[in-house]
Amino acid sequence: MMQICIISSAAAFAGPPEFAAYAATKANLMTFSQSLRALSTPYGIRVSCICPGFIESGMSGDLLAAGSSVPGFMLANTGDMAQRIKEAVDGEQACAIWPISHALPLIMASRLNWLNGDLSRWLMSKMGVAGQMVT
C-alpha cells in the first residue's frame, strides 16, 4: 500500500483575515487531498491530510519575532506533531487535526460565518485566533 501525506493547516477551516492567502492555499490543499484520496483509493494509494495548529517552527518564530500575535496557548511541540503524523499515516486516516484545541476555534468560527461574518470575526478576535500580522 502506498501513502501520500499532504500537509495543510488548521487555518484551512477558517483563516483569520490577516492570513487570507495562507489560509486559502491550505484550504485548497485540504480539498485537493479529499479528491485525491477518492481518486487514488482504487489503485491502493491512501491519502492523508495533516492539519497542524500552531507548532514550534521557523515560521512561527519569524512571525512572533516580527510582532505578530498568536493565540495565548503555547506552541505545540514538533516531536509530538511528528508522532501524530505517523499515527495518521499508519492508520490511513483521511484527515488529522492536531492539536484539536488549536483548530476547534477556527472550525467553530467557520460554522458561524454563514450566519454573520462580522460576528465570526469578532469571536475569532476575542478567542485570540485573529490578530495582527506583520509582513
Image (cartoon, rainbow, N blue to C red):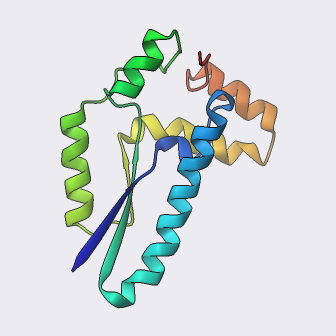
The image shows residue 48, relative to residue 27, as above or below, that is below
Q: Is residue 73 visible?
A: no
Q: In this view, does 59 lie to the left or right of 44?
A: right
The image shows residue 126, relative to residue 97, as above or below, that is above
The part of the image, by quadrant, that contains residue 128 is top right
Q: Name the foreground residue: 133 vs 113.
A: 133
Residue 109 is situated, as x and y percent measured from the top left of the image, at 64, 39
Q: Is residue 117 visible?
A: yes
The image shows residue 23, relative to residue 6, as above or below, that is above
Q: Residue at x 21, y 80 (%)?
A: 1
Q: Name the foreground residue: 73 vs 19.
A: 19
Q: Is residue 97 left or right of residue 26?
A: left
Residue 115 is situated, as x and y percent measured from the top left of the image, at 80, 45
Q: Residue at x 41, y 37 (%)?
A: 53
Q: List the single residue furthest toward the bottom.
A: 42
The part of the image, by quadrant, that contains residue 107 is top right
Residue 18 is situated, as x and y percent measured from the top left of the image, at 65, 27
Residue 63 is situated, as x and y percent measured from the top left of the image, at 47, 19
